[in-house]
Amino acid sequence: MDTRLAESINTFGHSPKADFPVSPAEPSITVPTNLLQDLLGALQDLKEEVSQLQAERDQDRQELAALRTKIASLESLQEQDITRVCMDIAVDRRRLAALECPKKEPSTTETERIERIEKLCQDSPGHVISLSELRGRMEIDKAVLSRLLKKIDRDKFYLRNSSTDKRIRYLCRRSEVR
């Protein structure tokens, strides 16, 4: 009777039909508790490490922004320094040029020659002397005489052309100085 009772109990209720598909039971995996605890602990450690890395990343971004600001200010200072140095160089160049090329005062020989030219003109008749005669008496060439004539006092002397021959020029003493 036990087998009969068991069969009746097993067939009690809806019996599966032959055409109804039965899904195979999903395979079940059994995982020991200590392994699950280790996995959960590792997961918690990973979450903490990720949050720490995110905090470090945020801090790095702030430092990077601060460095970019600092670089921009340093570049601005560098440009100002370059401008200042260039201006200083320009001023120094002007000073050097003034030191290297001071206005030349006539040397003693030039001063002596100019005085001699003035004396020759003053001693000549009518206070007029031709430039060719000056060159001959002083034994200098045209270029030197031309340079010396530029330094002669224009308030006392002047140059004029000959009325008969345009190639001849004269050094004349002004009448109000005589």
Image (cartoon, grey):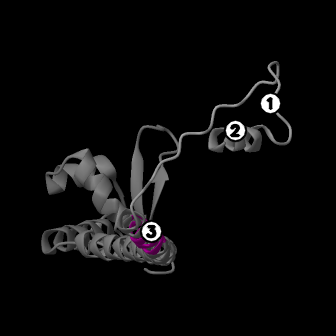
The residue stretch that appears in magenta = 39-50
- Three-letter amino acid code of the residue under disc 1: Pro
Alpha carbon of mark 2 to alpha carbon of mark 1: how far?
19 Å
**Measuring 34% from the left and 52% from the top, which residue is drawn there?**
130
Q: Which mark is residue 40?
A: 3
Q: Earlier in the sequence, mark 1 or mark 3?
A: 1
Q: Is residue 49 left or right of residue 27?
A: left
Where on the picture, by quarter, is residue 173?
bottom left
| Secondary structure category for the residue under label 1 | loop
Q: Is residue 96 left or right of residue 43?
A: left
Where on the picture, by quarter, is residue 138?
bottom left
Where on the picture, by quarter, is residue 26?
top right
Quadrant location, the N terminus: top right
Q: Which mark is residue 16?
A: 1
Q: Residue furthest bottom?
A: 177
Q: Earlier in the sequence, mark 2 or mark 1?
A: 2
| Residue closest to the eye, 69 or 83 | 69
